Image (cartoon, helix red, strand yellow):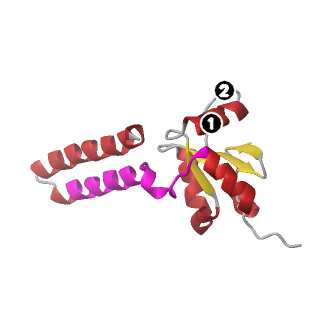
């Protein structure tokens, strides 16, 4: 769990140092602006912007029951953030699994990506899709007409 917070904490520490230096030089406005930028970066790279993760086994069970896709992701991944942001409100209609928290999830991702932990890997109807286009994923969430 601590590995997920390393990058956000580095952003906070570096931002604090840069902002403090700027404020001490008399550039208060610049210091505050820099601190806000670094805070935003820390927030974007933290696990907080993602829905609550479940375990791989539980996500597969839920997906089998409700037909929703399963997304394997990890904090700090730019492609995962892109998918998360572009899905908007649809993000809650998927099961999210943090591969850094669940060794079984990491193994599932490696099994379909030639041994690499390439994320996001999205399973739709049991089939893996590595780093899919967010528009395609959003289309998979659309209600099926019968």
Question: SS class of the residue under badge 2?
Answer: loop
Along the viewing direction, whichever of 97 and 119 lies nearer the viewer: 97
Residue drawn 16% across the image and 48% down it: 20
Residue drawn 74% across the image and 55% down it: 64
Residue drawn 37% across the image and 56% down it: 40
Relative placement, left or right, of 58 versus 125 is left
Q: Which residue is mark 2?
A: 115
Relative placement, left or right, of 54 versus 61 is left
Which quadrant is the N terminus positioned in?
Answer: top left
| Residue 136 shows up from this direction | no
Which residue is the extreme one toward the top? 115
- Where's residue 57, x and y in %? 63, 45
Instruction: Examine the image and state in which quarter residue 56 appears.
Output: top right
> How far is disc 1 from disc 2 in space, using C-alphas?
9 Å
In the rendered view, tell whether residue 87 sits above or below residue 100: below
- Where's residue 37, x and y in %? 33, 54
- Where's residue 97, x and y in %? 57, 48
What segment carries the magenta color? 30-56
Give the dominant element type of the magenta stretch: helix, strand or loop.
helix
Residue drawn 41% across the image and 50% down it: 46
Binning the other alpha carbons within 10 Å of mark 2 as few (below 14), some (14 to 19) or many (20 upward) gives few
- Where's residue 129, x and y in %? 73, 45
Question: SS class of the residue under badge 1?
Answer: loop
Relative placement, left or right, of 129 versus 40 is right
Relative placement, left or right, of 21 versus 83 is left
């Amino acid at each position: 769990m601590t590995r997920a917070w390393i990058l956000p904490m580095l952003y906070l520490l570096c931002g604090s140092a840069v902002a403090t230096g700027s404020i001490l030089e008399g550039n208060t406005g610049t210091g505050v602006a820099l601190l806000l930028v670094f805070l935003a970066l820390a927030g974007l790279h933290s696990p907080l912007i993602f829905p609550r993760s479940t375990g791989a086994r539980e996500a597969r069970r839920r997906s089998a029951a409700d037909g929703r896709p399963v997304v394997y992701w990890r904090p700090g991944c730019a492609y995962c953030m892109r998918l998360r942001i572009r899905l908007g409100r649809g993000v809650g209609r998927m099961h999210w699994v943090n591969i850094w928290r669940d060794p079984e999830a990491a193994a599932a991702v490696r099994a379909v990506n030639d041994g690499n932990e390439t994320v996001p890997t999205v399973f739709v109807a049991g089939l893996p899709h590595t780093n899919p286009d967010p528009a395609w994923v959003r289309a998979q969430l659309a209600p099926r007409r019968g």
